[in-house]
Amino acid sequence: MNSMLRRRFLQALPVMSAALTGWGSSLAADFPTRPVTLIVPFAAGGATDSFVRSIAVLAGNELGQPVIVDNKPGAAGVLGANQLVRALPDGYTLSILPEPVFRLPHLQKTQFDPMSDFTYVVHLSGYALGIATLSTSPWTDWSAVVADAKKRPGQITYGTTGVNGTMHITVEEMSRRQGIKLNHVPYKGESEIIAALMGGHIDLAVTAGSIAPMVDEGKARVLVLWTAKRAARWPNVPTLRDIGMDMVANSPFGIAGPKGMPPAVVKTLHDAFRKALEDPATQKLLERLNQENAYLDSAAYTAFARERYEASRKQVERMGVTPNQ
């Protein structure tokens, strides 16, 4: 850049800055004037989809504009994150960010950097993840699965929402610790996993709350939960800690937008979704899905994201996984 062009560029900076500030202020004052899109990076019908659709309606009522759920399943739950890096930071495109968003950058090249590419709006919940099987299966507890797997390495199948997702990584770490080999089968969402289990296409299903109706009907049983403590709904089902593995994997998730969103827009969205989360109908739904209210405001969620990013790096190093760049 020659000296004349440089001088003109520097002279234009205050004008550009004022224009951007004015744009942000105008946007915040009017926001929202049209529907907001909230991406769910899993298939319709699973626990995440059911929960998000419910709070989307309530948040839309608060915003005065609909919150439209857009399912983008696949890629271990990071397709929403991919969409955010291409979206305008105007508050009209948001996504659920599941835990793989913080793990995958340590394993492979990604389209996003979770530490610089997102505006964290509000943290919502975490799953009561666990491993289930059909009630007709020969395994009545996890130790029976381990014993069988040692006799038949690689022959027992389990379904998750994708390679390198929390479901997959956790089962692989469990298997490593217990000296067994299971056969991983990836699906696009929890509804597909449960359908595969009920249809006899897989032996084990890693699921969240969506398995509950099948358990209540006596069609399935939960062998082990990955929660910090036993679930009130299934007090007889042990946690990983109960069976000798000091592990917790609840795959927490929240809502984020593109980087650079105006603070006033973030606050408007945060307030609407917080009110939706605290609604009695949402609390009843969380109880039915066996999930927790894990609310964090925007600042706390940003700090939590950094914590999860670092924890995921250590987990990948501990497992000895070689990054695929």
Image: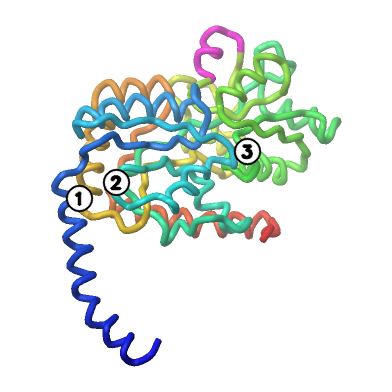
* Colour convention: rainbow
Q: Earlier in the sequence, mark 2 or mark 1?
A: 1
Secondary element at image label 3: loop
Mark toward the viewer: 3 or 1? 1
* Residue that badge 3 annotates: 162
Check disc 1: other Cα within 10 Å, few if <14, some if 14-19, many if 20+.
some
| Residue 216 inside the magenta-drawn segment | yes
Q: Position of residue 222 (x, y in %)?
A: 59, 22
Q: Name the image quarter holding residue 270.
A: top left
The picture quadrant where one finds residue 289 is: top left
Residue furthest to the right in view is 151
The numbered dot on residue 259 is: none
Residue 137 is situated, as x and y percent measured from the top left of the image, at 72, 15
Residue placed furthest toward the bottom: 3
User: Would you say the residues marked 3 and 1 are in contact, meaning their CB atoms lie under 8 Å apart?
Assistant: no
Q: Residue at x 53, y 40 (%)?
A: 77
